[in-house]
């Protein structure tokens, strides 16, 4: 066979367990965690990987149009969501783009099921104010992942290394700003610069 044209292809192990799905955006696998298949959701075309436990463990997805373009190679924590991602994201109309390596962390272990239950309950709340309060409570309960590190170019055209603490607050920035000036900044928990070498 010289060429194969499919809308979706499932790769399985010797026992028939799913290990990888290659699919277009309309037939993409919704994901699986802790033995449970996740609800149907919109997902871009690409590859979704599954480990020996049957859980989704990462993938490569991509899209591109005049309104939105991107490509993401993700690595998931065992029994949880993504912790590392090589990413490219662009708004072609506004000519804004971000690309680089992104790292996250989770304050607590094994919180995926509770997090999904909270998100499901949040969507049932009547007002945006109630939803915002519920989301903030999830943060206080350490159920949300925290942004920890980014290496690359930001939407503000800053290229460099950006490190955040366990609460997701920026603490160290080493970068070239949009005016081509090199900068090193150390910040406190309120975002105030407490050390910045003079030029």
Image (cartoon, grey):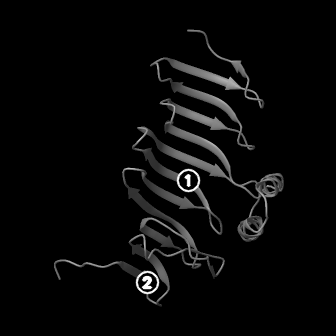
| Residue 15 position (above or below residue 37) | below
For the residue labelled by badge 2, is the local secondary structure a helix, a strand or a loop? strand
In the image, 6 versus 145, the foreground residue is 6
In the figure, 138 relative to 96: above or below?
below
Indicate which disc residue 84 carries.
Answer: 1
Labels 2 and 1: the sequence-earlier one:
2
Q: Residues within 10 Å of mark 2 (few under 14, many from 20)?
A: few
Q: Residue at x 71, y 26 (%)?
A: 187
Apparent side of residue 118 relative to residue 92 in the rendered image (left or right): right
Indicate the position of residue 14 as horizontal and vertical percent values.
43, 88
Which residue is drawn at the image coordinates 47% and 30% (left, top)? 157
Name the residue: 50% across, 19% down: 182
- Name the disc covering residue 12, or none: 2
The count of marks equals 2
| Image quadrant in which you'd find residue 116 | bottom right
**Whole-percent x and y of residue 31?**
56, 74
Q: Position of residue 69 (x, y in %)?
A: 41, 51
Q: Residue at x 39, y 73 (%)?
A: 22
Residue 64, given in percent of the width and then of the height, sits at: 37, 55
């Amino acid at each position: 066979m010289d060429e194969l044209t499919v809308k979706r292809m499932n790769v399985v192990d010797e026992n028939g367990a799913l290990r990888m799905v290659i699919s277009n955006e309309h037939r993409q696998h919704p994901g699986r965690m802790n033995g449970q298949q996740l609800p149907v959701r919109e997902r871009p075309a690409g590859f979704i990987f599954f480990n020996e436990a049957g859980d989704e463990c990462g993938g490569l997805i991509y899209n591109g149009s005049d309104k939105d373009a991107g490509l993401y190679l993700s690595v998931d924590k065992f029994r949880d969501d993504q912790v590392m991602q090589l990413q490219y994201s662009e708004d072609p109309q506004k000519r804004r783009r971000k690309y680089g390596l992104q790292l996250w962390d989770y304050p607590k272990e094994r919180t995926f099921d509770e997090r999904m239950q909270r998100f499901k309950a949040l969507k049932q709340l009547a007002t945006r104010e109630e939803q915002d309060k519920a989301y903030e409570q999830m943060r206080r309960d350490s159920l949300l992942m925290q942004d920890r590190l980014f290496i690359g170019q930001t939407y503000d055209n800053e290229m460099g290394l950006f490190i955040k603490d366990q609460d997701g607050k920026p603490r160290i920035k080493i970068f070239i700003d949009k005016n081509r000036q090199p900068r090193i900044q150390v910040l406190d928990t309120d975002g105030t610069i407490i050390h910045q070498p003079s030029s």
